[in-house]
Amino acid sequence: MRALRILGLVLAALTSASSARADFPEKSKTIRIVVPYTPGGFNDTLGRIVAQKFTDDWGVPTVVENRPGGGTLIGTDAVAKAPADGYTLLVVAFPFAVNPTLYAKLPYDTVKDFAPLILAGQAANLLVVNNDVPVKSVKELIETAKAKPGTISYGSTGSGSSNHLSMELFRLMTGTNLIHVPYKGSAPMVTDLLGGHVQVAFDNVPNVVTQVKGGKLRALAITSAARDPSLADIPTVAEAGVPGYEVGVWFGIVAPAATPPDVLARLNAELNKILREGDVKQKFADQGVNPVGGTREHFAQHIAAQIEKWGKVVKESGAKVE
């Protein structure tokens, strides 16, 4: 029932706006794409791809504004309170659907304050360990964690990130106890993982695949429902010993909720066009991300389902902001 209520509110946001301006976008105005993360990583890449294409296709100046901090809350809140005219957009990802449950109070309403634009891409996480950790499989990791509870530490790119919740779901489904060490991004986390300061982590495939292929980290499994053809020798977490386990990493774009419907439709059409272009598909592939696209309604349904799924995981696992 909760999922249906969330979906109803999200879908209502699709049609609740005022009338649109027929001349959108105006060439005299600048489109601002807010990325609530530091530069680097796919969230930033997505924002910059879209910004360049808007400039090329529409002749409208478009800038990317990185506004990290507060577990994505600072940049997200800025867009929630921005003018709802189509000239301020927000890159969102996995934490967007986790934060409503992870935080006791948010400065914005995830459902009511945003209009979904497009589900841009999806990827997976790899479960990796430092080479000095004496485990060669998911089953061995579970056995070791149970034999020595609270002695294995795992890194994440921050509370509420896909890395964090991937491990919280793993802990919940395996009955293990690992210690969470949050970082401000993938790069410092991977550096500490390589140095042995943390022993294990889930991370986006493009962030660790080079180290895995170079023998610097050991990959135990991938979080997707099926094996990745480019990493065919790495099993899924489900087939490696945790039946039913699956985590999908996703990326999308939203606008302030009161943005006019015609403007939202124009933006969705342009974004779908961008995602179909060959150079964009290649840039996504280089980062281990599959383009998705589709309707605004499809993205609304995805957000509702993600809020429902991860809300349960946060509550049942006891995950918290650290």
Image: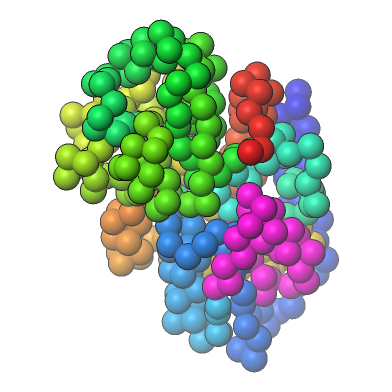
Is residue 83 highlighted in magenta? Answer: yes
Is residue 241 highlighted in magenta? Answer: no
Where is the N terminus found, in terms of image quarters? top right
**Residue pushed farthest bottom?**
28
Is 179 in front, or is 301?
179
Is 135 in front, or is 41?
135
Circle count: 0
Is 300 in front, or is 185?
185
Residue 236 drawn above or below residue 229: above
Is 205 in front, or is 318?
318
Q: Which residue is drawn at 32% across and 42% down?
A: 195
Q: Residue at x 55, y 85 (%)?
A: 61
Q: Which residue is drawn at 21% across and 41% down?
A: 216
Which residues are drawn in magenta? 64-91
Residue 71 drawn above or below residue 135: below
In the picture, measured across the screen, residue 304 lies left or right of residue 182, that is right
Residue 40 drawn above or below residue 2: below
Quarter of the view holding residue 316: top right
- For the rendered model, the colour scheme is rainbow
Q: Residue at x 43, y 12 (%)?
A: 148
Residue 104, horizontal then vertical, whole percent? 79, 37
Residue 297, horizontal then vertical, whole percent? 63, 47
Residue 42, horizontal then vertical, whole percent? 43, 56
In the picture, measured across the screen, residue 255 lies left or right of residue 46, that is right
Residue 180 shows up from this direction: yes
In the picture, measured across the screen, residue 188 lies left or right of residue 268, that is left
Where is the C terminus found, in terms of image quarters? top right
In the picture, measured across the screen, residue 112 lies left or right of residue 52, that is right
Residue 308 shows up from this direction: no
